[in-house]
Image: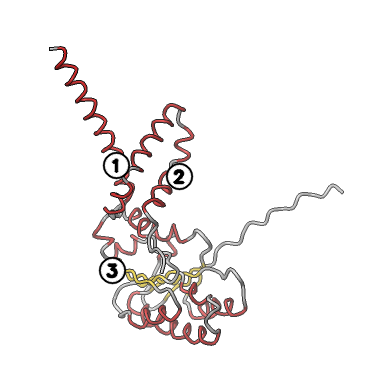
Amino acid sequence: MGRTLPSITQAFLIEQDSFGRFRRALRRSDQVALDDLFSSARQHLAAAQFAAHALPFEVFLLSMLLEEHKEVMRLRGQVDELLERLK
Amino acid sequence: MDEFLDVRPGKWTLLVLLRGMHAPLLSNLHRLAERGPLTVLDGGNRFNAYLVARGARGRSELLERITVSRAFTCYQMLSLLETTLSLPAPILVLDLLNTFYDESVRVHERHRLLESCITHLDRLSRPAGGAVTVHPPVVPSPAAIEFVQMLQSHAADTWLPPPAPVVPLPTRLF
């Protein structure tokens, strides 16, 4: 009978495309950062599909935040490790 | 887009929408849901819940008022209309003729089914009104054109897309 909703990958690509003009207006360095954010959201598409949220972009934003927080946690761990060594 | 959603009890409006014109309609569907329950019958798999949810800004109380049923053949469409109760809620039929353009069903059969569908549309739109969307046939066969005309003749109002602007031809040099 076919799909009754776009798949989460299609929804993601639609959302990403909708920011095309915004991306084009950014500096090259910012474009790279934006692309990184979207690729971090892409890593959690399976979870986003499972969430079946009415507003998928909210899930994509949370996925971006999740990856950013993982990075913060990793860096915090490294800082703690360095501080231990300096003691 | 407001005129699309101007539903009045006892009448249904026919909206002839071109490709891509369903998206703004769906984005504004929450306005009907703000007034109360809304029944959507989808004949062309046009109901994109993400667009509706975005229009409603994710307000679940609005989204829960919308009931969607889908039909994938003209027989299913008639069956849907037959089994839908006439409630004091506006009815929106999306892409009604999509399944009726299917040439694998005989013309007189589709004609009969559409006539029955129109009877049920009249019944369902009596309490709170309704709207029916169709898209023009890709292959403008006489039968397909007749189906659109049948709907037009029974609808209280018809909204047609504005004609494409005429681009003046450049003056020929030779």
**Disc 3 chain ID:** B
Q: Chain of mark 2?
A: A
Q: Are marks 2 and 3 on the same chain?
A: no
Q: For the residue labelled by badge 2, is the local secondary structure a helix, a strand or a loop?
A: helix
- Residue at the outermost front position: A85
User: Which residue is the site of mark 3?
Assistant: B37
Secondary structure, mark 3, is loop
Amino acid type at circle 1 is Ser
Label 1, label 2: how far apart the Cα atoms are: 18 Å
Mark 1 or 2: in front is: 1
Residue that numbered label 2 is attached to: A17
Between marks 2 and 3, how big is the CA–CA gap? 33 Å
> What's the residue at 33%, 74% (across, down)?
B128
**Crowding at mark 3 (Cα within 10 Å: few <14, some 14-19, many 20+):** some
The numbered mark at residue A20 is: none
CB atoms at circles 1 and 2 under 8 Å apart? no
**Residue positioned 57% across, 71% down in the render:** B137
| Residues marked 3 and 1 touching at CB (< 8 Å) | no
Position of the N terminus of chain B, as image quadrant, is bottom left
The residue most toward the left is: A87
Checking the image for residue A63, the label placed there is 1
Q: Position of residue A3 (x, y in %)?
A: 40, 63
Identified by mark 3, the residue type is Pro
Give the class, few, some or many, for how many residues have Cα within 10 Å of label 2's Cα (few <14, many ≥20): few
